[in-house]
Image (cartoon, helix red, strand yellow):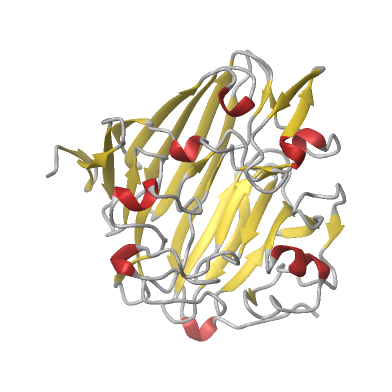
Amino acid sequence: MTRQSSTAPPGGTISTRPLGRLADGRLVDLLVLRNNRGMQASISSYGGIITSLIAPDLEGEPADVVLGFDRLDGYLAGHPYFGAIIGRYANRIGKGSFTLDGETSILARNDGENHLHGGIAGFDKALWKARPVSTPDGPQVELEYSSVDGEEGYPGRLDVTVTYTLTHDNELRVRYHATTSRPTHVNLTSHSYFNLAGPESSDVSDHLLTINADRFTPVDAGLIPTGELRSVDGTPMDFRTPVAIGARIDGVDEQLRFGGGYDHNWVLNTTGSKLSLAAKVSEPTSGRLLEVLTTEPGIQFYSGNFLDGRQLGKQGRAYGRRCAFCLETQHFPDSPNQPQFPTTVLRPGLVYDSTTVYRFRVSDPRQMKDRSPS
């Protein structure tokens, strides 16, 4: 039952309906944004999760291009961060600790000996206060959450606002805003799993990927950066021209062995904090093209290596290995322990402000070619 509906000029709409309740009885809402070109995004107040993202193909046929569940129960039962807001710190922090201004913070070790994606109860499991907003650009959802001092081991109360705007140009714009009461580390992202061919597809190997990066951050066996910024030249990490995701993924390479495929951070070729193109992905059957723009210095490309078919998603479909990919815009993993990396420190009186745009286009599949760098 839809409880609320509003119009976002010209032609966009926002509707709100209950998705279910948490174990403590709190109500979870689902907010559905529709622009005036037929694109649709559904956002849950639980975890700020993008539960579906419906985009047209070359023929104008819509399809859901992200993984997830039909019911709230699927998300509550545990999942690999499908579509969720990640915080306080996206990606890994080595050995689950950092020292800031002489004070050591001990975090949950929820990924072997390391801390991953904000810990045991990160932002992906928070109930956000959701408010629909109508804007000239398109329908918008504003989410708010206050993370208390000491939550998951992080210092300072962190007040966070995340806004999703579905523009009439078929862009999902995500803006992150945060302030803190004490010095802390902040690194927020969105963790959608994409398959641009739509829900019937079980493999993303033929998707053509471009990443605007000359360097990446190599990792050790625990997927913690070594501190090096390594050139992509002559490596399977070179996506400066379009390459099929599956073209080199099983090659003999130590970095691919550590990640079971791609699960690495690329150092984007950006200047300053201006919004700029980070990556592009095209799917040759549907003609869908995804462009990712961001103000962040890095992007994590993950090729779904740890999906194993045990997770039953929408319409009971099993999500198997490499059936989707993630492009998580971010600061670098383990930056709190890597002083040579761009800083993730936020101090009182300052504002964390970051924007990422997922722009959907279509391209003639006949013009898509699998090219490997020479």
Q: Nearer the viewer, residue 363 or 125?
A: 125
Q: How many labels were placed on the picture?
A: 0
Q: Is residue 373 above or below residue 52?
A: below
Left or right placement of residue 374 versus residue 182 in this view: right
Question: Where is the N terminus found, in terms of image quarters?
Answer: top left
Q: Residue at x 76, y 77 (%)?
A: 373
Residue beneath the point at 27% across and 43% down: 30
Asked if 153 appears above or below 5 in the picture, the reply is above
Q: Quadrant of residue 330?
A: top right
Closer-to-camera residue (110/90): 110
Residue 127 can be seen, yes or no? yes
- Residue 374 rendering spot, x and y as whole percentages: 81, 80
Q: Quadrant for residue 243, please give it.
A: bottom right
Residue 237 visible (yes or no): no
Residue 99 picture location, percent across and down? 79, 25
- Which residue lies at the image location 57% right of the left edge and 78% below the top edge? 205
In the picture, measured across the screen, residue 341 lies left or right of residue 129, that is right
The percent position of residue 341, horizontal first and vertical second, equals 81, 39
Q: Position of residue 127 (x, y in %)?
A: 38, 32
Q: Is residue 336 left or right of residue 29?
A: right
Q: Residue furthest bottom?
A: 366
Q: Residue at x 40, y 46 (%)?
A: 49
Q: Is residue 366 above or below residue 192?
A: below
